[in-house]
Image: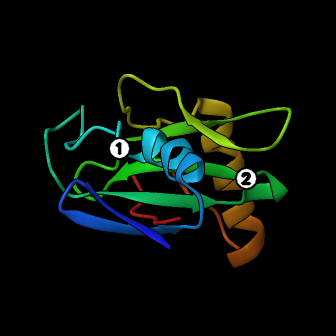
Amino acid sequence: MIKLNTKIGKHTLQMEFGKMKDLHKFGSIYGNLPQKCTNCQSDNIYLSYKNPKGNDYYTLACGDCTADANFGIKKEDGGLFWKAEKMSIYVASDSQNQENVDNAQKEFGGTIAPGDDVAF
């Protein structure tokens, strides 16, 4: 068994491999990640996984400014690759914001006016 420890920000990722080629394959992905958020320079970055509406998103995220960057997913084998040069903060479009408001109104009843203090 071959072990590899690599840092992602202030966190250490420990991986074990049975074959040297697997270490090289995965080590090359995780060993090349930025050590700090490219948006705010914080080292409070971590690997994240989300599955909204059945879609898989594998990201590197910042715990301080909420910036993130998606990994690419290979079509042929579903493997991941790092494709981003810069992490960014997601800002919902006006239509997405309106959808969030509409959903909240349906779920909780009542109306939400601009300027209301509401958390989604």
Which label lies toward us, 1 or 2? Answer: 1
**Looking at the picture, which amino acid does disc 2 mark?**
Asp
30 or 24: nearer the viewer:
24
Q: Which mark is residue 56?
A: 2
**Looking at the picture, which amino acid does disc 1 mark?**
Gly
Q: Relative to residue 48, is residue 105 drawn left or right?
A: right
50 or 105: nearer the viewer:
50
Label 1 packing within 10 angstroms: few (<14), some (14-19), many (20+): some
Q: Quadrant of residue 106?
A: bottom right
Looking at the image, which residue sits at the far bottom?
Answer: 108
Residue shown at the point (81%, 56%) measured from the top left: 53
Q: Position of residue 73 (x, y in %)?
A: 70, 37
Q: Position of residue 32 (x, y in %)?
A: 35, 36
Q: Position of residue 113 (x, y in %)?
A: 52, 53
Q: Relative to residue 107, is residue 92 drawn left or right?
A: left
C-beta proximity under 8 Å, tags 1 and 2: no
Instruction: Please tell me whether mark 1 sits on a helix, a strand or a loop.
Output: loop
50 or 9: nearer the viewer:
9
Q: Is 2 drawn above or below residue 56 in the view shown?
A: below
Q: Quadrant of residue 96?
A: top right
Q: Which mark is residue 31?
A: 1
Residue shown at the point (44%, 47%) measured from the top left: 27
